[in-house]
Image (spheres, rainbow, N blue to C red):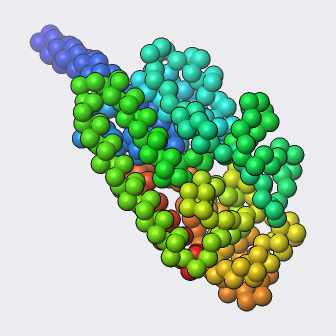
């Protein structure tokens, strides 16, 4: 009998501690982010207060924004979030439904595209680009239209360090609103991180100025429009940034090969998830056939594992600077 009482007492104590732990866990500020740049910016601004925050990266298994579908667990996480951060482009069509069912009615939602307002660019179809299978992409020269259906916006806003500054300020403001006790720390962390973004931005400006070329060429999709526009660079590419195409036509390959020759480029670029096949085919069709294939990281397939192991937005953008410097030689 004593034994049974003892077991019951232990069970009761365990149950109490589990409930206490659960209650304690739910006291944490819940922040849910879709992609790695948002996650990492938030992590930087939270700083040492990370122990009091439950920070989630939804797209943490290497799948990129364009092919992501949320699981039931993802929807549940969003539903109870205090702060939810997402990109806000066509790839995020599923968000509307997720937010409709949110149980936390005081949730602060940050939509990157909305935050940036008129800094958001329409997707651009450049000369020589592979036409899409469906005629979805039109060239609008970046002008703003009220009719959202007319324009497909370029979602890859995180690839501009200048955009990152604006977006980090918005994240810091949301954190301060939801956790006023730590607002001063968030403000200080934002200030320190902004200084790092500014320093890297200056390095990009200097590298572009020092380069002998002013154009980069991609045998791949091109998500770097915001980056090249920041520094006045020109580009050519096989496909637009959100394209699902993987096969380039003969015309596209020949056009891009001729551009490599004409501009005397020493490299053809691809993004981190590309296999480099189109880039190599372009090089094979150039006169010298000696250009290198280089990779710029569009930070679309960074995993939670990499995030844990020390990968940061700044480190990736520093790596991209080294590649860009090489491409502009």
Q: Is residue 289 placed above or below 249 in the rendered structure?
A: below
Q: Residue at x 24, y 33 (%)?
A: 184
Is residue 94 visible in this depiction of the protein? yes
Side of 164 where 249 appears, left or right: right
Image quadrant in which you'd find residue 28:
top left
- Report the number of discs: 0
Q: Residue at x 58, y 75 (%)?
A: 327
Q: x, y (%) of residue 143? A: 73, 42
Q: x, y (%) of residue 2? A: 11, 12
128 vs 90, nearest the viewer: 128
Q: Residue at x 60, y 62 (%)?
A: 232
303 vs 82, nearest the viewer: 82
Quadrant into which the N terminus falls: top left
Side of 86 where 92 appears, left or right: right
Side of 323 where 309 appears, left or right: left
Q: Residue furthest left?
A: 2
Q: x, y (%) of residue 29? A: 34, 26
171 vs 82, nearest the viewer: 171
Q: Is residue 185 placed above or below 128 in the rendered structure?
A: above
Q: Residue at x 83, y 52 (%)?
A: 132
């Amino acid at each position: 009998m004593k034994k049974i009482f003892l077991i019951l007492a232990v069970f009761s104590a365990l149950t109490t501690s589990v409930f206490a732990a659960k209650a304690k866990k739910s006291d944490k500020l819940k922040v849910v982010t879709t992609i790695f740049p948002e996650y990492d910016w938030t992590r930087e601004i939270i700083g040492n207060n990370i122990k009091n925050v439950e920070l989630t990266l939804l797209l943490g298994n290497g799948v990129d924004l364009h092919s992501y579908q949320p699981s039931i667990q993802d929807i549940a996480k969003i539903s109870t979030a205090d702060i939810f951060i997402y990109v806000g482009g066509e790839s995020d069509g599923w968000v509307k439904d997720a937010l409709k069912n949110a149980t936390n009615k005081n949730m602060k939602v940050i939509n990157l595209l909305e935050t940036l307002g008129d800094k958001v660019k329409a997707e651009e179809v450049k000369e020589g680009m592979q036409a899409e299978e469906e005629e979805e992409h039109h060239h609008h020269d970046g002008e703003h239209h009220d009719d959202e259906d007319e324009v497909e916006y370029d979602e890859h806003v995180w690839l501009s360090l200048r955009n990152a500054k604006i977006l980090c300020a918005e994240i810091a403001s949301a954190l301060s609103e939801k956790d006023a006790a730590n607002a001063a720390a968030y403000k200080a962390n934002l200030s320190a991180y902004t200084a790092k973004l500014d320093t890297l931005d200056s390095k990009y400006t200097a590298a572009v100025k020092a380069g002998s070329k002013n154009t980069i060429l991609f045998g791949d999709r091109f998500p770097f429009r915001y980056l090249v526009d920041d520094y006045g660079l020109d580009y050519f590419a096989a496909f637009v940034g959100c394209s699902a195409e993987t096969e380039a036509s003969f015309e596209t390959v020949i056009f891009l090969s001729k551009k490599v020759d004409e501009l005397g480029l020493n490299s053809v670029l691809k993004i981190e998830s590309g296999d480099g096949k189109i880039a190599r085919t372009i090089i094979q069709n150039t006169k010298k056939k000696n250009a290198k294939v280089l990779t710029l990281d569009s930070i679309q397939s960074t995993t939670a594992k990499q995030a844990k192991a020390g990968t940061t937005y700044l480190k990736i953008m520093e790596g991209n600077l080294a590649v860009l410097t090489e491409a502009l030689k």
